Image (cartoon, rainbow, N blue to C red):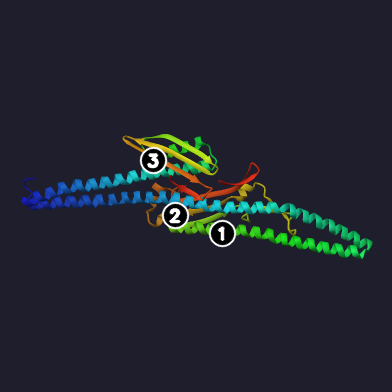
Amino acid sequence: MKQSGQAVIEMIISLPLIASCFILSLLFFHVHIQHLWMDHQLYQTLICLAKGKTKLTCETQMKKKIKSFLWSGQLKNVQFHHPEEKKWKGSFIWKTGFWRIKFIKQINLKRGLYYEKY
Amino acid sequence: MKNIKPANRKTNQKGFIITLLLVGLPLFISCLMIFTSLIFCIRNHDLAQSFCLKHTLQAQEQMKKALKDLIRLNPLADQLRKTQKYLEHLYRKALKSGEPIAITTLKTKIKIIKYQRTLLDKKQKHILKSTIHYVEQAFFSFKKDIMKLHPGYIQKDHHHPLPLAVKARPLGDLAPSYHPVDNFSFHQSLSFFWKMPLHYFLPKWLTRTFFQNRLSAYDCSTTIKKHKLQWKTFLN
């Protein structure tokens, strides 16, 4: 009787522990991938602009791709600049619940810096 | 429930945990596998893209310079060709009139012009040859950078037989003038292609479902265009 009680306690402790580890690690990976995906999309949009396509086309494409991957939250303050020849800067804010993440990126095809965060 | 002995109950609970682990662990591992593969793919894709753009653009910048140098030599090539034609015409006339001094002078002058044209031809051929080196160097550097990331299938593509899409006029002549071919920017485009062999370490259904070809393969293309009377490199 004593032994079976111990087993039940073990099960009660271990099950939520395993489950929470499982959920937490999945959540961590999910957030990491979301972050990476948005970073990737911003970079792709800058490349799209560098190819000479219009801001509207590239921005629409970016929003579509981000929304196909993320089901919650919204994009805010989407800005693109072309300060110099062969230099493009872009930024946006991803807002979901309490979370507000700002993504900033620039590409410079002239100086040989093709992929940089600033 | 009351009929189950405590020992049996304990074994049942242990069995339950083991079954749960047996079901949950592969599920957890496969989820982790998908996530890490996705992270790996996105990172490598962006890096490969930046390497690709970097090296093709560098090659095109060098080829742009070569194109400018070649075009800059055209007036000299035209002038030397015309001078040689004129001198040959005078030489034929001198031969008919039979003036020995004029014949010798013109012969020497023609020889000098021919020598100058040979030098110019060598210069032009050297510029054209160096463009092959630029493309090969760019492809080699791209390959080297990619291999640091992950080995994969790499290929380069060029629409014109020569790295610099120019044609000689007159064809087959010594030191001809070189001009960009029709639809130059199309023929001048240089593409590098890279494919990550995901099927080596991921099951096929997973690569097809989650990654398709967009993240595991990448190609970039750059070219040279004339923009506002200036040659500039562009992304295709």
- The amino acid on which the numbered mark 1 sits, given as a three-letter code, is Glu
What chain letter is assigned to the residue under label 1? Answer: B
Which one is in front in this view, the residue at disc 3 or the one at disc 1? Answer: 1
- The amino acid on which the numbered mark 3 sits, given as a three-letter code, is Phe
Q: Is residue A13 in view from this perspective?
A: yes
Residue drawn at the location 53% of the way across and 41% of the way down: A84
Q: CA distance from mark 2 to mark 3?
A: 22 Å
Residue B105 at x, y = what percent? 86, 63
**Disc 3 on helix, strand or loop?**
helix
Q: Residues within 10 Å of mark 1 (few under 14, many from 20)?
A: some
What residue is shown with label 2? B196
What residue is shown with label 1? B136
Asked which quadrant contains residue B99, the reply is bottom right
Residue A8 at x, y = what percent? 12, 48
What chain letter is assigned to the residue under label 2? Answer: B
Disc on res. B216: none
Instruction: Answer with left or right where residue A4 lies relative to residue B111.
Output: left
What residue is shown with label 3? A69
What chain letter is assigned to the residue under label 3? Answer: A
Q: CA distance from mark 3 to mark 1?
A: 39 Å
Instruction: Answer with left or right where residue A31 lies relative to residue B196.
Output: left
Residue at mark 3 shares a chain with residue at mark 1: no
Residue drawn at the location 64% of the way across and 54% of the way down: B66
Residue drawn at the location 54% of the way across and 52% of the way down: B56
**Placement of A70 over or under B211, stated as above or below:** above
- The amino acid on which the numbered mark 2 sits, given as a three-letter code, is Met
Residue B135 at x, y = what percent? 57, 57
**Disc 1 on helix, strand or loop?**
helix
Q: Kindly give the residue lying farthest to the right in the view shown.
A: B97
